[in-house]
Amino acid sequence: MTRTKKSGMKTRGGRVAVIGALGLASVTLAAGPAFAKGGVDITAPPTAQVGKTFTVAAHGDDDAAGYLRLCLEGRSGGPAWHRVTCGAVVPTGTEAQATAQVKAAQRGALEYRAIVYGLTSPTDRNPVRERTSAPVTVDVR
């Protein structure tokens, strides 16, 4: 008499279920969103006197690009933002910084924000906006 090995549907079904579960788990992990780490902070005095100079400073980082550059933008009363200054291009892992000395020419509210740009090389002519800070307001009296 010859003995044959039992290979029923339960055994094959179990293998298929395990392989399917492992495949689904690997696809789920690979398809999850990748979030870049970083941030940007800006500081400015809450008030300033007409004719006096005050400092607006910002620093930020992001790990989504090879190089970073931080720029400061400002506006007074209108919807358009205007570039005030930009800092030096730095490699990722180094904090990008920018500082502006602003002279308050007239009364009113001035708003400033900082923007971190990502670059692929130190001479990249097409920077990508990575992060933008919340605006800070300076009340000029």
Image (cartoon, rainbow, N blue to C red):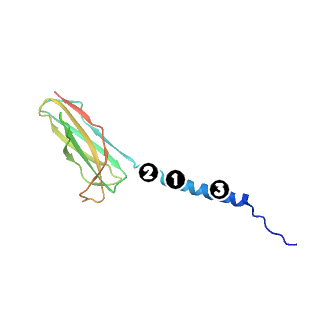
**Disc 3 target residue:** 17
Residue 32, given in percent of the width and then of the height, sits at 48, 51
Q: CA distance from mark 1 to mark 3?
A: 18 Å
Residue visible at 29% across and 60% down in the picture: 121
Identify the secondary structure beneath mark 1. helix
Residue 32 as seen in the image, left or right of residue 97: right
**Residue type indicated by callout 1:** Leu
Mark 1 Cα within 10 Å, few/some/many (few <14, many 20+)? few
Q: Nearer the viewer, residue 45 or 72?
A: 72
Cβ–Cβ under 8 Å for marks 1 and 3: no
Identify the secondary structure beneath mark 3. helix
**Residue type indicated by callout 2:** Ala
Give the mark nearer the N terminus: 2 vs 1.
Answer: 1
**Disc 2 target residue:** 34
Identify the secondary structure beneath mark 2. loop
Cβ–Cβ under 8 Å for marks 2 and 1: no
The residue positioned farthest toward the right in the image shown: 1
Give the mark nearer the N terminus: 1 vs 3.
Answer: 3
Residue 90, given in percent of the width and then of the height, sits at 29, 54
Give the mark nearer the N terminus: 2 vs 3.
Answer: 3
Residue 85 as seen in the image, left or right of residue 35: left
**Disc 1 target residue:** 29
Q: Nearer the viewer, residue 6 or 136?
A: 6
